[in-house]
Image (cartoon, helix red, strand yellow):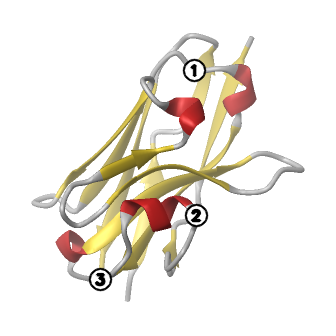
Amino acid sequence: QVQLVESGGGSVQAGGSLRLSCAASGYTYSSYCMGWFRQAPGKEREGVAAIDSDGSTRYADSVKGRFTISKDNDKNTLNLQMNSMKPEETAMYYCAAGRGVTASQSLRSIGMNYWGQGTQVTVSS
């Protein structure tokens, strides 16, 4: 059974940093594309960053240069380092996984079949 468990959310002031982690289990982690998504109240879910099985990454334009996605195949862990955070990035952040998906497809939620429960991130001004 595939399980994704996010951690690392919390509150930070604008300009600050947070690091999210996602612990994965129940599947061959290294062969899946992994992604981070977020959804703010009243808004649609959006792709933030993705990394495919070959290590290729994609980022939403709004986070390029500030967020970094990485994965540790030995520890089955996905990370998202978020720097210079903005109040409008307050949202629930989700980890997701999909097999046979490119990072570009992942950002559009294509083929992302497994989702975590999310971790709340609040950025105050």
Q: Quadrant of the C terminus?
A: top right
In front here: 1 or 113?
113
Q: Residue at x 52, y 15 (%)?
A: 84
Read off the residue under disc 1. Answer: 85
* Residue farthest to the right, as pictured: 42
Q: Quadrant of the N terminus?
A: bottom left
In the shown orientation, is residue 77 left or right of residue 114? Answer: left
Identify the element where label 2 is drawn: loop
- Going from N to C along the chain, the mark reached first, 3 or 1, is 3
Mark 2 neighbour density, 10 Å: few (under 14) some (14–19) many (20 or more): some
Q: Residue at x 56, y 10 (%)?
A: 15
- Nearest to viewer (mark 3 / mark 2): 2
Q: In x, y percent, where is residue 10?
A: 58, 32
- Nearest to viewer (mark 2 / mark 1): 2
- Looking at the image, residue 122 lies above or below residue 102: above
> In the image, what residue type sits under mark 2?
Arg
Marks 3/2: CA–CA distance: 24 Å
- Going from N to C along the chain, the mark reached first, 3 or 2, is 3
Read off the residue under disc 3. Answer: 26
Marks 2/1: CA–CA distance: 22 Å
Identify the element where label 3 is drawn: loop
Mark 3 neighbour density, 10 Å: few (under 14) some (14–19) many (20 or more): few
Q: In x, y percent, where is residue 40?
A: 77, 45
Q: In x, y percent, where is residue 46?
A: 66, 53
Read off the residue under disc 2. Answer: 108
Q: In x, y percent, where is residue 70?
A: 27, 45
Identify the element where label 1 is drawn: loop
> In the image, what residue type sits under mark 3?
Gly
